[in-house]
Amino acid sequence: MRIVHLTVGMYKAVCAVDEDFLNAGELPYFGFHSLLDYSLWLLTLRAHKRGEDLPPGWSPYEIQAMVDDDGRICAIGQLRSGDTRDNTTWLGHIGYSVPPSLRRRGYATCYLRMALQYAFANGWEHILLTCDVDNLASKTVIERCGGQFAGQYHDAQYHKLQYWFYRDGAQWLNPA
């Protein structure tokens, strides 16, 4: 497994992820209708990673894919830099998703460990992860990776569990 940034050459793999979500009765993760739409989105992603042309209130972010040796996307992740209000309350610094047909195989745990390593290697000092209070699978992944429970965030729209990871607390490297 390895983490990669999405490229134009991954368009078919991205479409396969969307088909997987649709086949499970879920909304597509990406939702592109053409290679052109996808290519333009990739350009927008590059700008957003640099902090350019962001919507109001957004922080720089990047989207990654964890792929296997055949190039199949086994997990998708978002890394959001900065301690904005959203990042430190309900959204978190890292989010991830696994295509439905690949769930319960350890891919989320594998992705999260790799994403934490990537973020800390790139200078991040602390990382908040959140999950819906009823998302037992994500809660388990975060705890398995060493997330330190910090409490709950609740407002009219969200009810989230919050977990912190710290650069100097290397628990996130140790498998549970």
Image (spheres, rainbow, N blue to C red):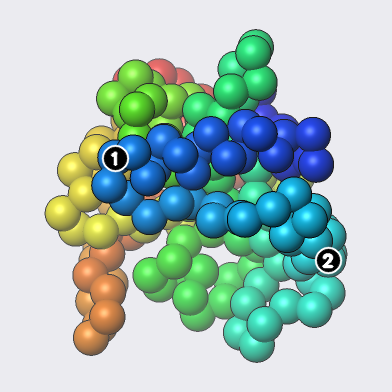
C-beta proximity under 8 Å, tags 2 and 1: no
The residue identified by callout 2 is 47
What is the crowding at mark 2: few (fewer than 14 residues within 10 Å), some, or many (at least 20)?
some
Q: Could you tell me if residue 82 is visible in this image?
A: yes
145 sits to left or right of 136: right
- Where residue 163 appears, as percent x and y from the top left, is 36, 53
- Where residue 104 appears, as percent x and y from the top left, is 29, 25
Q: Which amino acid does label 1 sit on?
A: Ala
What is the crowding at mark 1: few (fewer than 14 residues within 10 Å), some, or many (at least 20)?
few
Q: At 38% from the left edge and 25% from the top edge, which residue is drawn?
A: 102
174 sits to left or right of 55: left
Q: At 80% from the left edge and 61% from the top edge, which residue is drawn?
A: 40
Q: Nearer the viewer, residue 4 or 38?
A: 38
132 sits to left or right of 45: left
Residue 91 is tagged as: none
Q: Could you tell me if residue 146 is visible in this image?
A: no
Q: At 83% from the left edge and 74% from the top edge, which residue is drawn?
A: 52
Would you identify the image quadrant in which residue 174 lies?
A: top left
Q: Residue furthest top?
A: 69
Q: Please report whichever mark, 2 or 1, sits nearer to the chain's N-terminal start.
A: 1
